[in-house]
Image: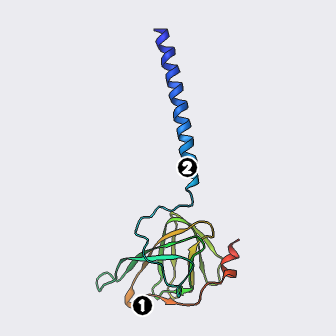
Amino acid sequence: MKKLGIVTVTVLMFLGQSCNTNKGEKQENLNAEDNELNAIFPKGEKGSDEYFTGNAYPVGLVEADSIHTTLAGNVYFEPGARSNWHSHPSGQILIITDGVGYHQIEGQEIEVIKKGDVVKCPPNVRHWHGASPDVGLQQLYFIPNTEKGIVEWMEPVTDEDYNKTK
């Protein structure tokens, strides 16, 4: 009986070491993929250079109608990509679904945003948002009360202003 106990303990120790080794290798693989975003929605077509600096891929998910006067969509920003300055007559809500990025309301400091953050952009207030230089950003956007208008696009965010986060 004692012999069986020693064998069992030895086997369990071996399995435990094997599990730890595999777990460690898996963790290394996860760390190597930290800069890869997990897409929830289709990437869509590249956004217009008229409204974005770098590679941004907006895709509409919910079109506004007379009952649901709200637009919803997803934007995938590659590292370094960002929107131009813009405003929304009824404001905008962003839900960050992956990555790391920046958001700035005119006259305020740049805010770092990341997966799980919710950002409320006030009505008729100039702002911009986009990815960090090294990691992309995915965001859901919601624009309420579209009967008041949707967006007013303005000038690009300069590299100088974008780099004030460093």
Asked whether 110 or 56 is in front, the reply is 56
Label 2 secondary element: helix
Q: Which amino acid, by three-letter code, is at mark 1?
A: Gly
Residue 9 rendering spot, x and y as whole percentages: 51, 20
Asked whether 111 or 161 is in front, the reply is 161
Quarter placement of the N terminus: top left
Asked whether 89 or 61 is in front, the reply is 61
- Of the numbered discs 1 and 2, the one sitting upstream in the chain is 2
**Residue at numbered disc 1:** 149
Picture residue at 58% right of the left edge, 70% below the top? 79
> CA–CA distance between discs 1 and 2?
46 Å
Label 1 secondary element: loop
Picture residue at 49% right of the left edge, 10% below the top? 3
Quarter placement of the C terminus: bottom right
Q: How is the image coloured?
A: rainbow
Asked if the residue under mark 2 is in contact with the one under mark 1, i.e. CB atoms within 8 Å, the reply is no
**Residue at numbered disc 2:** 29
Q: Which amino acid, by three-letter code, is at mark 2?
A: Asn
Question: Which picture quadrant has residue 146?
Answer: bottom left
Which numbered mark, 1 or 2, is in the foreground of this view?
A: 2
